[in-house]
Image (cartoon, rainbow, N blue to C red):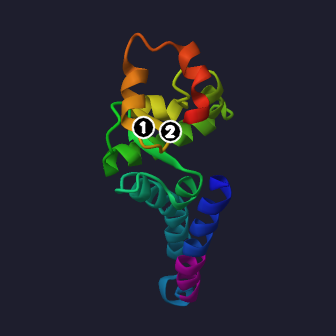
Amino acid sequence: MAFLIDPGVMAVAEFVILGALIALMPVLGFIYNGIFMTVLRIAIPLMYFSYFESSDRQATLGKTSVGLIVTSTEGRKITFLNALERNICKSFSALILGLGFLMILFTPKKQGLHDILSGCLVMKKTAGYKEKVSDILNSSYSPETYQNNTKSW
């Protein structure tokens, strides 16, 4: 569900902003307008994800709708720069034929390459989620225990 909501929100923002740029095309010129559009097509998703994941909500509108949050590996709220790093690293996950995203299925903490590189976790927001993060980081917490408890994440 989150993968449908977030692109929808970004599409509306892009429609408004890029529509204004198209209206300014006669003033700015075709080449400059094309450069601005390209930059905005990259910047809008980066800013959207980074802003919301580093906010007090700790999630985009889509992640909030399914009860997910993004935390540091210590269970703290991530900074805007950390969220920006995470989202830039998503391009690395995609560049290697999506293998960085498939890693989520096989890593003990269910982290993609971008999460590992940026030191983040995506988890279900529950009443005791900070304690669960500390359990995962505790050396006595095994991947088997994590696999058995994934329903509460």
Determine which quarter of the picture holds residue 153: top right
Q: Is residue 101 above or below residue 55?
A: above
Which of the numbered marks, if any, corresponds to residue 123? 2
Residue at 50% from the left image edge and 57% from the top image edge: 60
Q: Which mark sits nearer the N-terminus, 1 or 2?
A: 2
Question: In this rendering, is residue 91 above or below 146?
Answer: below
Give the residue type that dot 1 points to: Tyr
Q: Decide whether the magenta segment is chiefly helix, strand or loop.
A: helix
Where's the N terminus, which quadrant?
A: bottom right
Q: Picture coordinates of residue 19 (x, y %)? A: 59, 82
Per the model, the C-alpha gap separating discs 1 and 2 is 8 Å
Which residue does the image show at 46% across and 53% down from the upper left? 59
Amino acid type at mark 2: Met
**Considering depth in this image, is 42 or 52 the residue closer to the camera?**
52
Q: Position of residue 38 (x, y in %)?
A: 55, 64
User: Quick one: which residue is furthest to the front in this view?
Assistant: 127
Magenta-tinted stretch = 15-23
